[in-house]
Image: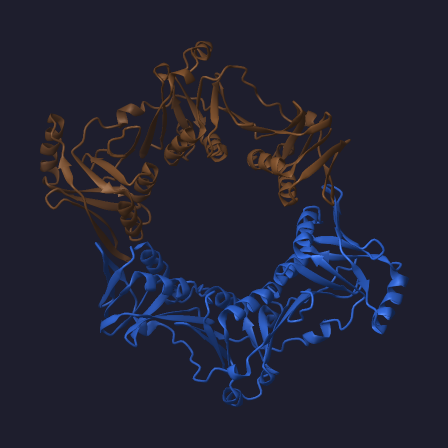
Chain colours: A blue, B brown
């Protein structure tokens, strides 16, 4: 191996490829990064056996070759070099790096020992603007379960059953709250051929870690993301990077049944004002249940956020907001029920404040709609007039 | 207690007073902050028995009073409130706080239980621009010892033996390296009366934690710092804040004898270039000794920074820099000695890279002077032409 490339490109590549966290301590070579000359440039790859990331950079190749190098050392080293050209040369297992007064030799390990990355030789199922996909991932990520007791909930569901109509749906839930993001694709960006090859895969579950890495690496600038799917893997191509991940096996629960079709009352609030009130109340919440109360007053048209712990103190914040009963038949039925339980016009719902904060942060707009179904049925958060993102949260039964 | 003040002022006060870390877990009230109406405003104070900090804010006081409140809770709470007026009222041990829709009750503990802060009823010994003092503290701080085996080295020495000439000296050392910062005061800012009252205290040792807090709290804006000293305490007044700290007892070593009076060779280097070369070399340094080598070539006029570990690899960076032998008689004697040891014109000195990085970072200028005394005598770092800050570092004997 003998080539010249720039410090800037190398550094960018290492920022992407060098972040794959190795959880497998029995295979030390996974702490290394694979360097390989390819297509008149250098390909850097890294894997933890679940997720593989690679990035290609251009350069002047004089001799082909491949080697693996300790990731952390190499990334730290390159990031400290001055910008400009870097000369890389491999002699046996020693990688020599020269640039602008710096002479360095780094001991590597043979590339033959490095695990092969799986490949998907298929056409992209769909293409999408990377920024749009990045934002959608960010909205559902907080709701992914971190408990491994139900593996299928530790990933994001990508439902492609209606992709022919140009619709895909991202879903995450930990069974206390659920986030659903619908994406509408341009039909020319969906490949019928690829779908035929794939067969009847209606949805896939992508591991949380893969989603996090992907959301981090997708550039904010305009770029196109291509998504390829096989039975057990998913591949993302974007810019000069590609990321391949195993899929989570198992059956995702029928999440649609969790989303209420109707509501009792609806209120539109200032997102920032509600977020702040919840943050303040959280300081007074019981530290094991994290419970705070929302008191809905339809007569006074306000929402009161409050929490109390006898040892600490109490807090109440009043937020003015128009509150409307659902005028539909289902709404009227709900109201009749509610009248019996807490007595009609003013009632309280108790939530885990963390779940409320996550939901409101994901809504990410000036206003938020809360569709409330009483103290023991799910509440739905969304942006007013938009149904592309909804966040369902189960109250705490007090 | 009944008063009105602004959220901005309260928040600023809590940023200063709320950061005093309580190490004493047997006295839970030290986790609280003392609020007391004073001089038509509110004084907030906190202490960990070693260090006490207070800050006064203006307000409209309707009823005097005092209480202690959990620091962390109160600071988090106030920081989340919207800006504007805050109404504070004490009823028994419950502090009620109202502002703009927020109503809060926080349970406090009686102010009578709170430890009394020591006082110094003396005139300031000297005054200084707070930014100048802040910068000087920042330069010596990294050299303070963190080992408690020699308590006197865990603080910064403030030598005031020549204060009548307008000179004070700040010193820190952990016996591997030493930082000395000389400050020249305007004579009108030194009080002869206060010095007479103080008697023959030639120097004091200020705990590291106090120096860190002080450096953090001194505003970057133009403000005057007043320093008062008693036998066992030191008091700093600045803006609306004051900080009182115990002094470290014990005798500081005679640090002057560590500072070499002459040198073998002197070289002026680009600080950033040398810092970068050391950072890169550090990746290849032995992780227990942290040793890197500086090879001084007087014939080629360059300094080579290098490190090597057989398992990791090696790095060498060459930095062009004029190197001059000391033309004085002492310099010539040193050169004759050096000739015998490593053979004259080109020789190596081994350092702990962390100490070099600290020193170069403290120099804080485009260029740095290195006065080198061979491989077993101290090297002195300073800014070219300036002697107000010097940093002495002992090589590792290889």
> Which quadrant holds the N terminus of chain A?
bottom left
Residue at (75%, 32%) from the top-left corner?
B90
- Indicate the position of residue A35 as horizontal and vertical percent values: 32, 69
Residue closest to the eye, B83 or A289 = B83
The front one of A301 and B143 is A301
Picture coordinates of residue A47, whole percent (x, y): 42, 70
Query: In the figure, residue A323 lies in which quadrant?
Result: bottom right
Q: Residue at (65%, 43%) from the top-left corner?
A: B77
Residue A376 vertical placement versus B393 (above, below): below
Can residue B398 be seen from the camera position used here? no
| Residue A324, quarter of picture | bottom right
Above or below: residue A195 compared with residue B245: below
Residue B224 showing in the rendered view: yes
In which quarter of the view is residue B120 placed? top right
Q: Is residue A373 left or right of residue A51?
A: right
Number of numbered callouts drawn: 0
In the image, B301 versus B203, the foreground residue is B301
Closer to the camera in the image, B153 or B294: B294
Q: Which residue is drawn at 44% across and 14% down?
A: B191
Left/right of residue A302 with respect to residue B34 in the rendered view: right
Q: Is residue B161 rendered to the left or right of residue B224?
A: left
Picture coordinates of residue A262 (x, y %)?
78, 71
Residue B218 pos. (x, y %): 48, 32
Q: In which quarter of the image is the C terminus of chain A?
A: bottom right
Residue drawn at 58 percent across, 87 percent down:
A200
Residue A141 against residue A197 in the figure, above or below: above
């Amino acid at each position: 191996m003998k080539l010249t490339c720039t410090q800037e490109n190398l550094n960018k590549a290492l920022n992407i490829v060098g972040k794959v966290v190795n959880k497998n301590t029995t295979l030390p070579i996974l702490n290394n990064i694979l360097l390989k000359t390819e297509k008149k440039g250098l390909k850097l790859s890294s894997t933890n056996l679940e997720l593989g990331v690679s990035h290609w950079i251009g350069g002047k190749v004089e001799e082909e070759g491949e080697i693996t190098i300790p990731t952390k050392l190499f990334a730290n080293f390159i990031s400290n070099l001055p910008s400009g050209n870097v000369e890389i040369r491999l002699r046996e297992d020693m990688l020599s790096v020269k640039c602008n007064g710096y002479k360095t030799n780094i001991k590597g390990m043979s590339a033959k020992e490095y695990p092969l990355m799986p490949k998907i030789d298929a056409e992209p199922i769909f293409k999408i603007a990377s920024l749009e996909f990045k934002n959608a991932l960010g909205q559902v990520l907080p709701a992914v379960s971190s408990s491994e007791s139900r593996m299928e909930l530790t990933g994001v569901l990508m439902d492609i059953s209606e992709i022919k109509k140009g619709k895909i749906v991202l879903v995450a839930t930990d069974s206390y709250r659920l986030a659903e993001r619908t994406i509408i694709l341009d039909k020319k960006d969906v490949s019928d051929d690829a779908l035929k090859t794939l067969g009847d895969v209606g949805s896939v579950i992508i591991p949380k870690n893969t989603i996090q890495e992907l959301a981090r690496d997708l550039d904010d600038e305009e770029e196109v993301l291509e998504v390829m799917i096989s039975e057990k893997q998913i591949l993302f191509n974007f810019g000069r990077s590609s990321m391949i991940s195993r899929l989570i096996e198992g059956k995702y629960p029928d999440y649609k049944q969790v989303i209420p079709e109707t509501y009792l009352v609806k209120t539109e609030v200032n997102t920032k004002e509600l977020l702040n009130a919840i943050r303040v109340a959280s300081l007074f919440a019981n530290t094991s249940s994290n419970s705070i109360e929302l008191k809905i007053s339809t007569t006074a048209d306000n929402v009161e956020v409050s929490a109390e712990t006898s040892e600490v103190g109490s807090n109440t914040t009043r937020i003015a907001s128009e509150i409307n009963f659902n005028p539909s038949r289902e709404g009227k039925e709900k109201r009749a029920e509610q009248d019996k339980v807490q007595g009609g016009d003013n009632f309280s719902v108790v939530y885990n404040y963390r779940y409320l904060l996550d939901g409101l942060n994901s809504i990410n707009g000036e206003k938020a709609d809360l569709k409330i179904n009483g103290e023991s049925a799910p509440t739905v958060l969304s942006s007013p007039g938009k149904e592309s993102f909804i966040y369902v949260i189960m109250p705490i039964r007090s």
